[in-house]
Amino acid sequence: MDGHGRATAPAAGTVLNALANGRGCAFAIDLETTAEVTLDDSGAFRGEVAEAADADTGLVERCAELAVARWGDDAATTGAHVRTESEVPMAAGLKSSSAAANATVLATCDALGVDPDPLDACRLGVQAARDAGVTVTGAFDDASASMLGGITVTDNTQDELLAREAVDWDVLVWWPDQQAFSADADTERCRRVAPMADLVAELALDGRYGEAMTVNGFAFCGALGFPTDPMLEALPDVDGVSLSGTGPSYVAVGDRDTLESLADTWNQRDGHTWLTTTRQTGCRTT
């Protein structure tokens, strides 16, 4: 153990938002968050976000604190400094919090010289997110996709992995210049679309991910008050399109030529587009 660790974790897109019925589905995409952790004996856990000096660092500080408590065995290790740097826009629905949590937990473990079970590390990050108040559901769906790679279906009420599969998709992301924090989402309105979420879960567990995410997108655009126009611009050519998380970003999957054409359309909107792919590998030390 040298007291310094580094790890990266991918972002994720939504197939099923877990706010309605506690079940979720997400897939890792090739946008990364990196965390560097340096352990010390300061008695304090301090965080720093490279892109935003005034950002709330409570989540990554809690991740490091819980990881040291769980896997550390040196009484002199009582604090840490965590620095994150990310390609993932914050509060855009692209699972920036889950990626930061996963990267921080694994970077802390790297600094401690331990190699935890990935799902144990993922669940610890989910607990930190609950403790920090940045999630309503615990986001085990988002966190598991980021930690493991591929696509995961989960029961977030039990932090249980129901299914995981490798998916090789091209992905187009569009996010406007606004933010939507998951913890601020209107959960009561989301619960009203539970019957649709049940259908999405059935489709996802049957491997019909494109159909699942499109149904999810229309349901949660309605519940959360986001426009469906970006989805309609993508249909019927893409394999699937959805509001990602609690917004404001949208994700579409399909063949590259179709997504490049859609990018031309989405680029006419204010905001940013990113043409990327899914990630089969998840969080890793570097």
Image: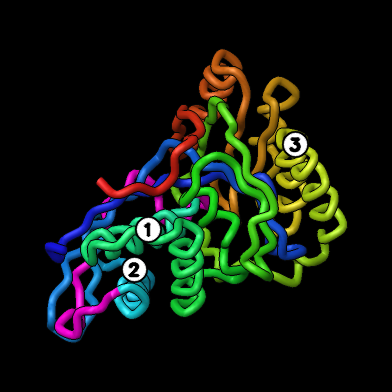
Query: Of the numbered discs in the image, which one, if any, rests on residue 100?
Result: 1
Name the quadrant containing residue 115. Answer: bottom left
Measure the C-alpha gap from mark 3 to mark 1: 28 Å
Side of 152 relative to 211 (left or right): left
> Residue 165: horizontal and vertical position, in percent?
62, 38
Question: Is the residue marked by circle 2 packed among few (<14), some (14-19), or many (20+) residues within 10 Å?
Answer: many
> Residue 201: horizontal and vertical position, in percent?
78, 50
Measure the C-alpha gap from mark 2 to mark 1: 7 Å
Q: Is mark 2 on a helix, strand or loop?
A: helix
Residues rendered magenta in the picture? 72-94
Question: Is the residue marked by circle 3 packed among few (<14), some (14-19), or many (20+) residues within 10 Å?
Answer: few
Disc 3 marks which residue?
207
270 relative to 113, above or below: above
Residue at (52%, 59%) from the top-left corner?
A: 180
181 relative to 281, above or below: below
Query: Of the numbered discs in the image, which one, if any, rests on residue 72?
Result: none
Q: What element carries label 3?
A: loop
Q: Are marks 2 and 1 in contact (CB under 8 Å)?
A: yes
Side of 211 relative to 94 (left or right): right
Disc 2 marks which residue?
60
Say what amino acid the circle numbered 2 marks: Val
Residue 52 visible: no
Residue at (37%, 58%) from the top-left corner?
A: 100
Residue 258 visible: yes
Say what amino acid the circle numbered 3 marks: Gly
Of 185 and 64, nearer the camera is 64
Question: Is the residue marked by circle 1 packed among few (<14), some (14-19), or many (20+) residues within 10 Å?
Answer: many
231 relative to 245, above or below: above
Side of 30 relative to 210 (left or right): left
